[in-house]
Image (cartoon, rainbow, N blue to C red):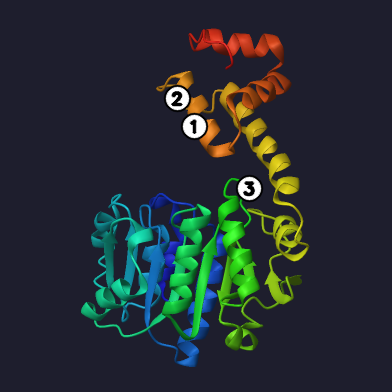
């Protein structure tokens, strides 16, 4: 690992985003093995946000292009320039409208004729995730790898559904999981990736061996194992997980750990978006966590009078 990569990993929080240490380690391990094996090509990322993982991809191999795809530039180009990354580029627009041919054309202008790694963290709907996965399967060269984020995140069931569909079609299959991400490759390449995370636990995911961190603090293997390997109902996993998320949000909010510059109505909307729960369900959970008196005190503090909070 280069000094530049290590320095960046030591200061990940300098760039906003959600790339966790386990996921960064997974990306670094995959990249190192690809370079050792002589697998060359560009790297592509669906969903860049501020560029936290895009910068890592660019630093790992400064000699090959990295192309980020996102709706808009959220300080990405600014961060690219601040790190002096001449090999990183950004293409803005609705990623659901950007197909493999458009990406190949863009990469050709950057001097690349193949793609060896794709990071998928874009549109988290089923339609969007499936588009990104199918496009990735079309783009990847032999020995190529996809790193897919939020596969078992209870807030994004569409990503899970798209992943299961890809596995069942055997377009892309999983081989490793860490930091909330799952690494996938062509079925023809699966044997080459058995040791990408040596020493980690191995689980069976819909018939494919997946090496997985057994003590990942970001996300334990329970959701991946149950939802992907056992094929249980998503609701049986997601409903309890969403309630748990909502309980944590309410407790954090009531404890004063939320910026109070916005209105309570604003935060209710944010909670609904993040948990997928209705206003009535959130109100019920708030009462469970705070009690009637605590909830009324919270409303008074924020000057909130509308019923159903």
- Residue 270 numbered mark, or none: 1
| Image x and y of residue 308, in percent | 59, 15
Left or right of 96, for residue 192: right
| SS of the residue under disc 3 | loop
| Neighbours of disc 3 within 10 Å: few (<14), some (14-19), many (20+) | many
- Residue 72 numbered mark, or none: none
Residue at 23% across, 61% down? 81
Name the one closer to the observer, 233 or 266.
Answer: 233
- Which badge, 3 or 2, is on the more N-terminal residue? 3
- Given contact means CB atoms under 8 Å apart, are the residues at marks 2 and 1 in contact? yes
Q: Which residue is mark 2?
A: 266
| Image x and y of residue 21, in percent | 55, 60
Name the one closer to the observer, 255 or 219.
Answer: 219
- Which badge, 3 or 1, is on the more N-terminal residue? 3
Q: Which residue is mark 3?
A: 154
* C-alpha distance separating marks 2 and 1: 6 Å
Residue at 44% across, 51% down? 17
- Given contact means CB atoms under 8 Å apart, are the residues at marks 3 and 2 in contact? no
The answer to whether residue 257 of the structure is visible from this angle is: yes
């Amino acid at each position: 690992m280069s000094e530049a990569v290590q320095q960046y990993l030591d200061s990940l929080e300098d760039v906003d985003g959600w790339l966790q240490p386990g996921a960064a380690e997974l990306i670094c391990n995959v990249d190192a093995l690809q370079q050792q094996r002589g697998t060359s090509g560009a790297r592509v990322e669906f969903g860049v946000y501020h560029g936290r993982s895009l910068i890592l991809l660019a630093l790992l191999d400064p000699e090959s292009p990295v192309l980020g795809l996102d709706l808009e530039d959220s300080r990405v180009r600014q961060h690219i320039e601040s790190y002096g990354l001449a090999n990183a580029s950004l293409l803005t627009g609705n990623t659901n409208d950007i197909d493999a041919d458009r990406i190949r054309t863009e990469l050709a202008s950057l001097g690349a004729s193949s793609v060896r790694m794709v990071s998928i963290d874009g549109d988290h709907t089923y339609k969007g995730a499936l588009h990104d996965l199918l496009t990735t399967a079309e783009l990847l060269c032999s020995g190529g790898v996809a790193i897919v984020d939020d596969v078992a995140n209870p807030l994004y069931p569409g990503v899970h559904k798209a992943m299961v569909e890809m596995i069942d079609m055997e377009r892309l299959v999983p081989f490793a999981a860490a930091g909330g991400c799952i690494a996938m490759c062509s079925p023809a390449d699966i044997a080459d990736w058995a040791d990408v995370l040596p020493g980690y636990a191995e689980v069976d995911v819909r018939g494919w061996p997946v090496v997985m961190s057994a003590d990942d603090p970001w996300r334990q293997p329970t959701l991946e194992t149950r939802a992907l390997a056992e094929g249980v109902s998503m609701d049986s996993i997601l409903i309890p997980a969403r309630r748990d998320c909502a309980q944590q949000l309410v407790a954090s909010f009531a404890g004063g750990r939320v910026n109070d510059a916005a209105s309570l109505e604003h935060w209710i909307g944010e909670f609904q978006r993040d948990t997928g729960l209705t206003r009535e369900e959130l109100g019920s959970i708030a009462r469970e966590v705070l009690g009637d008196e605590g909830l009324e005190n919270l409303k008074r503090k924020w000057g909130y009078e509308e019923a159903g909070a």
